[in-house]
Every structure is written in structure tokens, then in C-alpha cells.
Amino acid sequence: MPEPFDTSSPPFDRLDTKQAQTLLSALDVAYYRRGDTLIEKGDQNSALNIVIKGRVQEVNPDTKEVQAQYIKDDLFDARALLLGHSHHSYRAVEDTLCYVLPKAVFVTLYDENQAFADYFNTSFSQRKRLLEKAQQQQNLAEFILTQVDETNIQPIVTLNHDTSIHDATHILRKQRQDCALVAMKGGENDIGIITRTNLLHALVEDGHSQAHPIGDVASAPVISVEVGDFLFNVMILMTRDRVKRVRVTDNGETVGMLDMTQVLSLFSTHSHVLTLQINRAHSIEELALAANNQQQLVTSLTNNGIHTQFVMELISAVNEQIIEKAFRLTMPDAFYDKCCLFVMGSEGRGEQILKTDQDNGLILADDADWPDVQHYMARFSEVLSRLGYPPCPGNVMVSNPRWVKTQSEWQKEVLALCQISDERSLMDLAIIADSHAVAGNKSLLEPVADRLRSTLKGNMLALNTFVRPCLAFRVPLTLFGSLKTDKEGLDVKKGGIFPLVHGVRTLALEKGIRETNTFDRLNALVECHALEQETANNLTEALKLFVKTRLRQQLNDDAASGNQLDVTLLPRTERDLLRDCLSVVKKFKERLASHYQVRD
């Protein structure tokens, strides 16, 4: 006898108690021998099938092409039930046992329950979002979706720039506030901020009198967020810009203040505590203690159901602060503003969650005279290794003199790489295209990035060669549409992440798009009509699923690390989504090959 039907599995978990009982009462079990035809093309399908054991192939009889393969817990052919006839044939390739739900009962549940119907009507990207939303823990999901509004902001007083320190102190005490906004002399949009600590330092350390105007001691500009922004995004903003307070506006008008204490009271991942540890580190040893807490933060965020893209953004901000602090502690002060440290690859795109290999380079100002720069670069690479960032196997890091050049030299290098088509130059171009400045004089990177974009924008001949690496790896799907694995597992990087990311990178370079993050590039490609919204949505959801699934197995001590997925550990719904994701990548690669006329 088969095991009892599991109504907690999507989409049946969307049924209410009465509807679930109706489902269970109507279910029957059917047995098919190997070679039996369950549904012929054009048939009026009479039931929804849910595989208990065995294997069923969906075949296009006109082309003999296998469209998909269904195993335990997979269901088919709901489309035929809704459209009236089947587009393909279904045959058992093993002895197969299925639950059978009569068409009349399925249609009744479909008509009565919109959430149940949505599962069969929505696109892949919409269905994935619905599944993820159902799986998130309620309290954390509420936090992610909580917006800045009058229920979570504090009132804030705005003082004139000529207000004396004496008067401001009394006003803050009377209002029971520890800070105030200051209307500066530059106009109504020129806003500063003072705190009680600012006023104390002005009196004691700077020797100002109590009659001194607060406009001279206020900090400006003030970072602002709008009513309606997500609290999680506010926390990322505070972490990245290292501020404890943000001004809240409504159509540009001040309506209140948010501070980090409030945000952390709603979300206890301690990301800001980690940021404070990084900022306060005065030695590499102290910085290492903070950096060692990073994986704990990632584990906390992941285990508590935080959206993958939010985790990427937050950890990217933390990573950047660790690397910037390490660079500042290592470099001589005299040369800090004469150079720019930039990171590349997934770190440059802001898409790396766990620490990865070092991928970095250095741009020197053309007038910099730093003869022993390589001594310091070697030292810096050693420091990053101590902080948990292993050396790059390809030696793409500042300890290699090849990745340390003046700004003019880098511009010439980029131009030369664009004219060469060997494997090494293509890979160098790909990682340089994702460069992001993290320390030193960050403005030094922009002319180099501009040279790369201007050289490749609309250059279809160069891009024809540039795109080829993402077409080289096969998507790990069998001819039968099921997941293809070897003894090590399914390589999600080669088969999914790399072709998606590199394909999007290529399209972005063709259009001269400045963004380096893949999600931002997808949005920009939609805006310039290079991609349809639905395609961008599907690619976005596919990348998030690849990263999330890989991360979860990497954090599991019992699972193999790296990019190899053990698909046997995935539940049916996630296995189904992974298969859909890889199908999205396969179609995207076909589109790229056609667009760039790669026929070999």
C-alpha cells in the first residue's frame, strides 16, 4: 500500500481543511506497467496524476522529443485538464504507481481556491516567489516586508542653524531627544544633524562657547529614506554607510527619524554589532576576531528564512568593510589616497555570501611614486588570507604585479584585452567588467571602467567571442528533462550560475550599462528593452534559487561543500524548481547563441 497522501506539500497545502478532505476522499490509485501509455496527444484528460513511484516521460509524438520526466511526487497533466486536451503523450518507462484525482474534483478545487489555482496559472518566477513566501518563518517574513511608516519612526525636532549650543541643549532635554536636525544655510534641502555628543565635544574639545551656533558643529549631509522603504533596506543602508540614524521623509519633507536601536529591536541578527567591531578594530588581530563572526551571521540569516538577495546585499556591505579596514591597516597613510583597491568577480558584483578566493587589483595614480608597492601588496594578500579569504588559484590578486598598474596602464590594458580573443584575455575581461572599488581613492576606477564599457558597447564582433565561455558548459539536464548528476553531484556553478551571470554581463556590456550586480543589470536591460520583464524575472529567480540551494548545502556540515549539489537531499518542490531554473538557463543560452550568432 502507498503511504498516506501528503496534503502539506505544495500546491495542496493551499487547500483548507474541507477542501483537503474532499481531495483525500476522491483520490484513487492507478498502476501502469512499463511501456503503458497514460495519456495520448489530443486526449481529453480525465484526471490529475501524482507519481507515487516509478517514472513517466512526457513526449512530443511529432518530433519524438522527450519534454520532461516525472518521478516521485511530481504531478501531470494539469494543463490538459484546464485546456481540454493534452499537447503531448505520457508513457510509463518503469512500472509506475500514481495517485489519480478525477478531473471534476480538480476543477472544483481550482475554481473554489484562488491560491490553489495560482500554482497552475503563474509563471515559474511567480510560482517560486509564492513557494518561498509560504516557507518563510512568519516573524522574519513580516520584518522583511515591513515598511517605514508612522508606526516605527520617531519624532525629530528641526532647529535653525543660528540656534546656540546652550539653547539647543535645553531644547533636546525638554523634548527628551538625543539628536536634532539642523536647517543649514544652504536652503531648505540642506539638512544637518547634531547629537548631545556633538554639543559636548564642541564645548569641551573644540572650546566653543555656549553661544556658538549649532550650524558650525552639525554633521552634513544627512542620509534620508522615504516613507514606504523597507526596514531591511534601511538596515543595509545603515550598515554600508556606517550611520546610526537616518532621516525619514515624505515627498522630501521631514516626518521623523529612525535609529539603529529601533531596527535591531525588530531584527536581531547583530549585523550592526559586527559592523561596529570592524570599525573599532585597531589591529589585524582585532579585525580577524570580527571577520570570524561573519559566517555566524550568514547562518543566522539563512536559517531564519531571510530572502537570498537581502543576504547578498548585507554580507556584501560587511565584506567590503572588512577588506577596506584591512587595506587601511596595512597601507602607509601617505599612499592611501594615491591608489584604489578594487575587487572583482562575485565580490565585485556583490553576490558572494560566504568568503571566497581573493580577486582584486590595484590602480595607482599616474603621479604616484611608490617603488616598494609590491612589498605592501604581498603583505595585504597575506592579511586577507589570515582573515579567511584564500589566495586566488589563478593568481588574480594584488600580490601579482600583473594586477597592479597605474590608471593609464590599466586603460591601455583594457583596450588590449578587448582586441585579443584567447581564453585568458576573455576571462580577464570578464572579471574586470565586474570591478568594484572598495578602498583608497575610489574615483581612480571610473575612467578604467568607462574605457571597458565604451570599447565593448555595441561591439558585436568582440562580444561574439566574449559570450562563448557561457555557452561552453552544458546545462545539467538529461534529454528527458530531468536533473543530470554525476558521482560528485550537480555542478550548479558551471551549469547554472556562470552561464546566467556571464550571459547577463555580456548583454549589459553591449548596452553600455554601468551596473555590475546581476540583479541590477537585469533591471537595466529591461529598462532599455533588451530583455522582456518576464525573462528578467525568471532569470532573477533562477539565480536566487541557485545561490540559496548551494548556500544551504555549504552550511550543512553533513553535505559536500563547493558547487556540487546533492539533489537527493532536496524535497520534491525544490527539485522541481531547480529543474525549472535550469530550463530557464538553457533557453537563455539558446537566445544568446542566436543573438550573437554563435553557431558552433
Image (cartoon, rainbow, N blue to C red):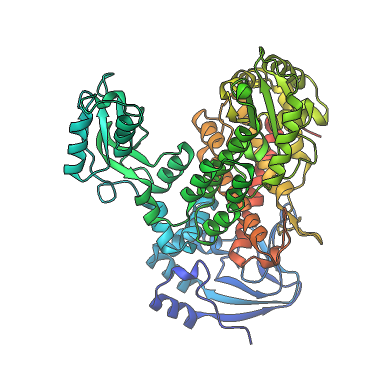
Q: Residue 511 appears in which quarter of the rendering? A: top right
Q: Residue 4 appears in which quarter of the rendering? A: bottom right
The residue at the point 26 percent across, 46 percent down is 154
| Residue 134 x, y percent position in the rendering | 46, 62
Q: Among all residues in the image, which is located at the extreme top?
A: 367
Q: Nearer the viewer, residue 31 or 1?
A: 1
| Residue 163 x, y percent position in the rendering | 20, 27
| Residue 583 x, y percent position in the rendering | 66, 50
* Image quadrant containing the N terminus: bottom right
Q: How many marks?
A: 0
Q: Note whether 283 is above or below 597 in the view shown.
A: below
Q: Is residue 243 left or right of residue 597?
A: left
Q: Nearer the viewer, residue 240 or 420?
A: 240
* Image quadrant containing the C terminus: top right
Q: Note whether 302 is above or below 14 in the view shown.
A: above
Residue 586 visible to the viewer: no
Q: Is residue 257 left or right of residue 551?
A: left
The residue at the point 72 percent across, 30 percent down is 376
Residue 262 visible to the viewer: yes
Q: Is residue 497 left or right of residue 221?
A: right
The residue at the point 44 percent across, 57 percent down is 268
Q: Nearer the viewer, residue 255 or 306?
A: 255
Q: Is residue 118 left or right of residue 287?
A: left
| Residue 144 x, y percent position in the rendering | 42, 52
Q: Nearer the viewer, residue 503 or 442?
A: 442
